[in-house]
Amino acid sequence: MVSVPQLARAASHGHMAWRRGARHVTLPWLNLRKARPPFSRAIGAAVQAARPGAMTDLVKTWDSATAEAHVKYNISDHSCIWDEIARHCMPFAEGKDVADLGAGDGTLGKLLPQAGKMTNVDPFPPEDCAAKILKSDGVEFLRSQPDQSLDLVVATFAVHFMDRASLDKELGRVLKPTGRAIWFSFSQSSVLFGSEEFNSIYYSVGFSQDGSGTAGSSAPTTVLKIDRPATSANLRNHVAHRCHSNLKQMPEHMISKLLALIPEDLQALDIRLDVFMFAPNPSRDGVVQC
Ligand SMILES: C[S@@+](CC[C@H](N)C(=O)[O-])C[C@H]1O[C@@H](n2cnc3c(N)ncnc32)[C@H](O)[C@@H]1O
């Protein structure tokens, strides 16, 4: 039997991992295969009870229902968003050694054909993935790389799944002197369709930590603004299938309220991405934000 303090400790230390297409929560000392969504929510309730305010840590959990929906309905997964991410990475990738940590199906790699060498890394790549994905935890991958060997390490919507202290330490070692690490995450400054009521609910949970900055560097290096074409059905599916981590934490009545506020004639969403850029620090034991 796993105690509530054990669960709380695991969540707060970031040991839960998620996996596309599998009913699976991974802990170092516990493997809950076939854990169904209600069970995941039970874990959430236990952790919340044990450590009030700890729900943000649960962005580290995942289950098959949300993973599949994420692939199909996530409003962040759109060509105009990918183009903007690729455009931002391009100057640091052209002819360079690049690694994408938490690469999923390797979409970004396909958009950066100018990279000299592109390594897609993900511990739980999708089974039907056409791109070559190295199956590894992001930090473990960096540990396997020589000193000062990478020009660009990037993570899109994935850095919060990795152990940040270890990640920063390894980056300080593996990045070349001119190398960069860049993290992209959905920003709570996204205006979406401009409804204050919708946004006050949407951002009311899960955004207490940005998940991308190191301690003391929580302001993004830059914010990308993207006008994403979207219909009412696109946003309704995104919300109803709880495609973002904050939605996964919301009770049903908040989801219903959000759905009721989506206009029928929606045509576009104002989406912003927080971008965090880091360079190796002079002592090479970590990184500094650029
Ligand atoms: C929200 S998805 C984003 C996937 C992809 N970057 C994208 O933007 O479509 C998060 C990804 O992080 C991966 N992930 C989970 N734990 C990880 C870890 N410890 N190290 C690296 N990647 C991890 C998951 O397998 C998943 O593919």
Image (cartoon, helix red, strand yellow):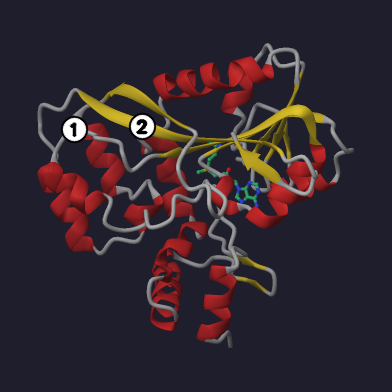
* x then y, percent, for residue 185: 46, 39
Along the viewing direction, whichever of 23 and 161 lies nearer the viewer: 161
* SS of the residue under disc 2: strand
Secondary element at image label 1 = loop
Q: Amino acid at mark 1?
A: Phe
Tags 2 and 1 touching, CB below 8 Å: no
Residue 240 percent across, percent down from the top left: 26, 48
Q: Taking the image as drawn, is residue 263 in sight?
A: yes
Q: Position of residue 206 (x, y in %)?
A: 37, 57
Q: Position of residue 88 (x, y in %)?
A: 53, 20
> Which image quarter is the C terminus in?
top right
Ligand 1 falls in quadrant: top right
Q: Pointer 2: residues within 10 angstroms few (<14), some, or many (20+)?
A: many
Q: Is residue 189 above or below residue 91?
A: below
Label 1 Cα crowd, 10 Å radius (few <14 / some 14-19 / many 20+): some
Q: On screen, 60 above or below 179?
A: below
Label for residue 272?
2
Residue on which disc 1 sits: 193
Task: Using the numbered discs, state the Cα–Cα distance from disc 2 to disc 1 in whole angstroms.
Answer: 12 Å
Image point 10% across, 34% down: which residue?
263
Nearer the viewer's eye, disc 2 or disc 1? 2
15 left or right of 60 in image: right
Quarter-of-image position of residue 99: top right
Lower position in the chain sequence, tag 2 or tag 1: 1
Q: Residue at x 28, y 51 (%)?
A: 203
Look at label 2 and name its amino acid.
Arg
Asked whether, in this view, residue 64 is left or right of residue 290, the answer is: left
